[in-house]
Image: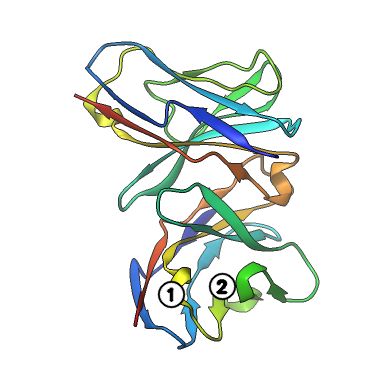
Amino acid sequence: AQSVTQPDIHITVSEGASLELRCNYSYGATPYLFWYVQSPGQGLQLLLKYFSGDTLVQGIKGFEAEFKRSQSSFNLRKPSVHWSDAAEYFCAVGGSGYSTLTFGKGTMLLVSP
Amino acid sequence: EAQVTQNPRYLITVTGKKLTVTCSQNMNHEYMSWYRQDPGLGLRQIYYSMNVEVTDKGDVPEGYKVSRKEKRNFPLILESPSPNQTSLYFCASSSDVRVGELFFGEGSRLTVL
């Protein structure tokens, strides 16, 4: 069965500093990987996705993620965090043989002034 | 505007009183799904539907029912709610869940006393 681990429950970053959120997955074949963001009181919104090809993918709001098969990881990065990036971030895994996505438990990002 | 609409957004009810949370999407998506979100547990899938009249259990289906009589609607039914069903519920839809872009509603916060 597929699974996703987000090791960090909370992360605090200073505004303007760089950000990396970790995601490790378990999947038997080639995974489809996703990052979603949930702002307070809102539903989830897709930030970016990886299916195949270039292992560095660009998303909305200046985010990027890198797929590393050898490490079973799909970490999310942003070079300079803005206060509006404070939210909860979810990594998810799916695949061509599955009819559902499996989400991690989320990482809450706090941005300090 | 493309959207997934859930109602009610907030509900307080009592144990055993049947309730229905409605979900409607205007994107002609075949796939629809219900999730519940609880602190520390992330998003867990309750039920999903690949198309009209096709539904299947997710990870936590106990105590819930669904139906998919029309493509646009996917109501979640709690026949006899209990306090452990107090949660934040999200409906989501997708044209193809394998490619991962789920569109989420804004959530329904349910409290069962």
Q: Nearer the viewer, residue B10 or A21?
A: B10
- Seen at 67% across and 50% down, the residue is B100
Q: Is residue B39 above or below residue B54?
A: below
Question: What is the chain identity of the residue bearing mark 2?
Answer: A
Q: Is residue A37 left or right of residue B49?
A: left
Marks 2 and 1 sit apart, C-alpha to C-alpha, by 26 Å
Secondary structure of residue under mark 2 = strand
Q: Residues within 10 Å of mark 2 (few under 14, many from 20)?
A: many
Residue type, numbered disc 2: Ser
- Asked if badge 2 and badge 1 are on a common chain, one would say yes
> Which quarter of the figure has residue A31?
bottom right
Q: Nearer the viewer, residue B52 or B103?
A: B103
User: At which x and y percent is residue B43?
Assistant: 44, 46
Which numbered circle lies on residue B52? none
Q: Is residue B85 above or below residue B53?
A: below
User: At which x and y percent is residue B16?
Assistant: 26, 12
Image quadrant in which the C terminus of chain B is located: top left
Mark toward the start of the polypeptide (2 vs 1): 2
- Seen at 43% across and 74% down, the residue is A83
Image quadrant in which the N terminus of chain B is located: top right
The residue singled out by tag 1 in the image is A83
Q: Is residue A54 above or below residue B11?
A: below
User: At which x and y percent is residue B53?
Assistant: 68, 15
- Residue A1: tell me if it is visible: no
Q: Is residue B67 left or right of residue A41?
A: right
Q: Nearer the viewer, residue A111 or A106?
A: A111
- Seen at 54% across and 63% down, the residue is A25
